[in-house]
Amino acid sequence: MVNTDILKDKSEDVHYTMGNLPVYMSTAALSEYPNMRALCHWHEDIELIRMLKGSMNYYVNGTRILLNENDCLMVNSRQLHYGYSYYSTDCRFTCTLFHPRLLGINDDLFKRYVLPVMEHPSLEYLHFEYKDDGAEVAEFLDQLVRLREEAAAGYEMEMLSILYRLWNRIVKRVGMIPAVIGERVASDISAQKSMVTYIYGNYREKLTLSDIAAAGNVCRSKCCEIFKHYLLQTPIEFLNSFRLKLSSERLINSEDSITEIALSCGFNHLSYYSELFFRSYGCTPSEYRKRHRDSRWNGRSAQCAGDIM
């Protein structure tokens, strides 16, 4: 499990788990996230979700996809996305990310087969249902996990081979998707990204609904409508969720006092911060710090709350 950093363009910088290869892999349960919900984010990497057990709702640019057991999902580069619980039920899944440059060994092949997928105006995601064509994709992802776990000599080369075969499967599927996107939808997504970007860059300040709406060049009611539709949260709820995520990481990784952490994350009142924290994490900030530093809470390591997904 790893955390992500916010880059200058407010996308996320993925901390890869494969040394020199730009690949991140993890297996997780949704119950490891506050309120069984990941924070909305985006990145340059291609993201692949493989459901192991249970079901999960997944949002990509405001479209809800129900992922059932054994389904797989490919989220394209630079798309707003997050997963959350399906009727408060838990699930288990693998998450694999890789940077598109991994497929760029040959410039001509990259231009012919990778860029058209990344820049396809209608391709936000691909849902591979197990009952249809998802079994093959699931097997590719399972092979990647097995290779990573066994880590035999030369396993990285085998992983690259599988990623290329998987990408070929994706290219064939993309060939059936018409390259169109509604003008209104494109406008809403652009405004949403601008407002999320503004929150990421100014969370320490005392932000108002008007400030967030202005960042997206929309009125306050349209701002609320977009957040509710795409993120199922109000703008202020999203702002506080992001502040809480940052504070949880600093509780573990710094020696700052809880008051200092609350203030640095944009909370001006300690009591309000503690109330929101307890509501999201089910414990006080001090309890969270102690449990995660001891690495004994639920028998897991300390960084589950900020993971990619």
Image: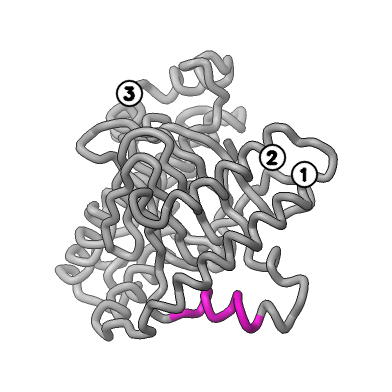
Marks 1 and 3 sit apart, C-alpha to C-alpha, by 41 Å
- Residue 118, relative to residue 14: is it above or below? below
Q: Which residue is mark 3?
A: 282
- Contact between marks 2 and 1 (CB within 8 A): the answer is yes
User: Depth check: 260 or 148 in front?
Assistant: 148
Q: Is residue 192 magenta?
A: no
- Which comes before the other along the chain, label 1 or label 3? 1
- Contact between marks 3 and 2 (CB within 8 A): the answer is no
Which circle marks residue 147 in the picture?
2
Q: Residues within 10 Å of mark 2 (few under 14, many from 20)?
A: some
Marks 3 and 2 sit apart, C-alpha to C-alpha, by 36 Å
Which circle marks residue 155 in the picture?
1
Name the amino acid, label 3: Gly
Q: Is residue 115 magenta?
A: yes
- Which comes before the other along the chain, label 3 or label 2? 2
Name the amino acid, label 1: Tyr
Magenta span dominant secondary structure: helix
Residue lying at 36% horizontally and 47% vertically, measured from the top left: 83
What are the residue bounds of the magenta stretch?
111-120
Judged from the image, the secondary structure of the residue bearing numbered disc 2 is helix
